[in-house]
């Protein structure tokens, strides 16, 4: 797997865990690169089972949420599953207001997300 600027990626037992590196993903270039990296993770996986952890992210722009919607669609098209975890309160509220909390599978933390995919 290639080196990523915004992601740490680990795979084991058929599940890929993507941890966003600490910081903010706010400006257009950062969001574009984040999307490119996320899409690259699932590009060669026929049935991706993916956990995306936001535990070290303080702010996520609405444009970044758009990349997550696209990621969810790509995972769905491949018959896979995506679970988001470690979202802060503000991001959770944004997802709830936009009704995206029903679109994504969301777990409190990485352990719960892994249980959801393995169970």
Image (cartoon, rainbow, N blue to C red):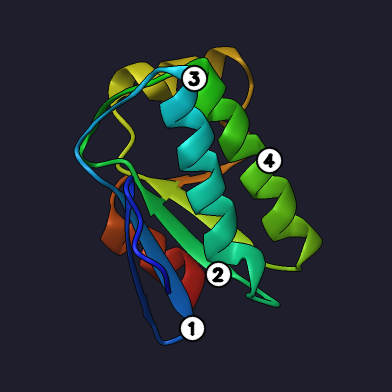
From what the image shows, is residue 15 above or below residue 103?
A: below
Residue 60 sits above or below residue 83 on the image: above
Between 27 and 72, the one nearer to me in the picture: 27
* Residue 49 position by quadrant: bottom right
Residue wearing tag 4: 70
Which numbered circle lies on residue 28?
3
Whether residues under marks 1 and 2 lie with C-beta atoms below 8 angstroms apart, the answer is yes
Distance between mark 2 and mark 3 Cα atoms: 27 Å
Q: Please tell me whether mark 3 sits on a helix, a strand or a loop.
A: helix
Task: List the residue tagged with mark 1.
Answer: 14
- Which is in the foreground here, disc 4 or disc 2? 4
- Rendering quarter of residue 79: bottom right
Q: CA distance from mark 4 to mark 3?
A: 16 Å
**Counting other residues with Cα less than 10 Å from the Cα at mark 2, is it few (<14), some (14-19), or many (20 or more)?**
many
Marks 4 and 2 close (CB-CB < 8 Å): no
- Residue located at (51% from left, 51% from top): 38
Left or right: where does residue 31 sit relative to residue 74? Answer: left
Q: Position of residue 19 (x, y in %)?
A: 31, 53
């Amino acid at each position: 797997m290639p080196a990523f600027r915004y992601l740490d990626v680990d795979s084991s037992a058929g599940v890929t865990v993507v941890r966003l590196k600490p910081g903010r993903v706010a400006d257009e270039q950062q969001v574009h690169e984040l999307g490119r990296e996320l899409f690259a993770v699932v590009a060669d996986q026929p049935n991706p089972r993916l956990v995306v952890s936001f535990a070290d992210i303080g702010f996520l722009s609405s444009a970044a949420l758009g990349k997550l919607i696209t990621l969810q669609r790509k995972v769905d098209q491949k018959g896979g599953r995506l679970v988001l975890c470690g979202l802060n309160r503000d991001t959770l509220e944004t997802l709830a207001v936009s009704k995206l909390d029903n679109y994504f599978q969301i777990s409190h933390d990485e352990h719960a997300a892994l249980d959801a995919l393995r169970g």
